[in-house]
Amino acid sequence: MLRRYLSLPPWKRRLAALAVGLTLGAAVTTAIVVPQRSALKRFRDDYLAAQRTHEVAKLAALFDWTGVPAAERGRLKLALVREAESSVVSARLEPLRAGDGDPRDTREGRQIPNLRPVCRLSVAFGGADAGYSTWLVGRAADGYRLVVYRPATPEKP
């Protein structure tokens, strides 16, 4: 087999090597991307299940609270209470847009995301309080979590 391969003209050997390389590259990429997509879809389904049962504790468990001050946690949990009362029409995973996950300046100072965002979760609400929410989703050690912006400098005790 090797003798036959080596007896081919150089352009055919290069073409065969290219075909093998592309096939292996596609297989490896598929082996990496498919589990990530299914994990993101499971995360979206977990969010929808918590939203549809109106359980604020389950919604809050989907966030990564690393480095987030207690006051910001309280404000965000109040927003979750209001959001849990709304009925969800749809939830979609979307690619990041320009500027998603960039540090931002607020009245409280510079804010940075506590996880590196990988995509956006856009949720549309129906009923009397129709509207939408968009959350950034990041990859944590234990799976995907919703990203929270935190102060760039840690709080002083």
Image (cartoon, rainbow, N blue to C red):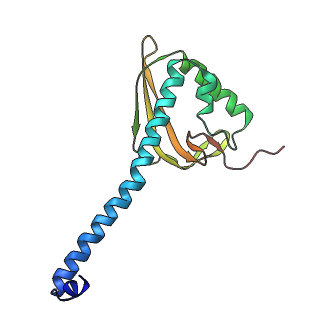
Q: Is residue 72 left or right of residue 5?
A: right
Where residue 131 sits in the image (x, y, percent)? 43, 21
Instruction: Determine if residue 90 is in view.
Output: yes
Residue visible at 34% across and 59% down in the picture: 27
Image: 124 above or below 68? above
Where residue 150 sits in the image (x, y, percent)? 65, 43
Asked which quadrant contains residue 20, the reply is: bottom left
Image: 12 above or below 40? below
Q: Is residue 105 left or right of residue 29?
A: right
Q: In the depicted view, which residue is nearer to us: 97 or 31?
A: 31
Residue visible at 58% across and 27% down in the picture: 59
Q: Quadrant of the C terminus?
A: top right
Image: 133 above or below 97? above
Q: Quadrant of the N terminus?
A: bottom left
Where residue 152 sits in the image (x, y, percent)? 67, 49
Instruction: Determine if residue 96 is in view.
Output: no
Q: In the depicted view, which residue is nearer to us: 51 or 29?
A: 29
Residue visible at 47% across and 42% down in the picture: 39
